[in-house]
Amino acid sequence: MKERNKHLEGDDDHGRRVASMFNRIASWYDLLNRTLSLGLDRTWRNRLVDSVQLRTSGKILDLASGTMDVSGQLQSLEEGLKILALDFSLSMLKQGQEKIDPLRVLPVCADAHTIPLPDHSVDCVTIAFGIRNILPRDSAYAEILRVLVPGGRLCILEFGSARQKIWGGLYNLYLTRLLPRIGRLVSRDPAAYSYLARTITQFPSAEELRQELLASGFQQVRYESLTSGIVCLHIADL
Ligand SMILES: C[S@@+](CC[C@H](N)C(=O)[O-])C[C@H]1O[C@@H](n2cnc3c(N)ncnc32)[C@H](O)[C@@H]1O
């Protein structure tokens, strides 16, 4: 596994804090994900994988890949397909090693702001539950645009901003009150799970994100709400 995060670029302080937080919770991440999403996270990631579009390069970049759930699913999409799983938390990548075939998936520890790939080298970039952690977003979009082939696609799976009430406010209550408590009990890291709730409530709405992606240079951007808008799938084409 290559380590490329000696120098965290972009918003350095934010990046260091986020990487260190994910390093701390890596061993709990998968279990908590499954439990706190009531198993729905698998269904959401399946939708992301279904939206992937392959063109000429035969390569996919799974950005902010974490414990590589998405990379593990992508590897069986097509014979000969190569996947780069990139994350700046080495512990998250290590945690997911069992899920991947090393002949198909190459895990790389690096920052999304400095992707170690040549220009126009991947057909598609996937980001599952990663974009809200990446700041600043505009320079990350510039890197994604640089590595995509002409006509390439970016598929983002992310929580909705949760500014509107979902299920009569029950979900909002779960997110801001219950989830940090459960996270605190299980992982003994209260900061991590209040951070999760905070980033979800502060994240732009689906329409704001669409405008942001269009402004960054994507030609066509659409989104689909999943599970009453708890999660959104954004598809941005060049
Ligand atoms: C919530 S996890 C999502 C992991 C995985 N994609 C999934 O579906 O479970 C967010 C991941 O984004 C990574 N991350 C956040 N900012 C990053 C950046 N600037 N560069 C690379 N990885 C980043 C974190 O280390 C973490 O593993």
Image: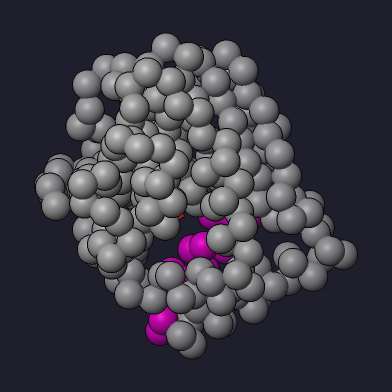
Query: For residue 168, which quarter of the picture?
Result: bottom right
User: In the figure, is residue 124 to the left or right of 202?
Assistant: left
Is 5 left, or right, of 95 in this rendering? left
Q: Nearer the viewer, residue 174 or 102?
A: 102
Residue found at the very far bottom of the displayed protein: 185
x, y (%) of residue 23?
28, 65
Q: Quadrant of residue 179?
A: bottom right
Percent position (x, y) of residue 210?
A: 63, 28
79 or 125: which is nearer to us? 79
Q: Residue at x 37, y 46 (%)?
A: 75
120 in magenta: no
Q: Residue 228, relative to residue 142: is it above or below?
A: below
Q: Is residue 199 magenta?
A: yes
Q: Which residues are magenta?
A: 187-201
From the viewer's side, name the closer residue of 134 and 71. Answer: 71
Please say which color scheme the image uses.
one colour
Does 108 appear above or below 181? above
Q: Residue at x 37, y 42 (%)?
A: 62
Residue 35 sits above or below residue 220 on the image:
below
Residue positioned most to the front: 79
Which residue appears at 73% of the width and 71% of the height?
173
Residue 119 located left or right of residue 186: left
Q: Position of residue 106 (x, y in %)?
A: 22, 45
Residue 4 in view (yes/no): yes
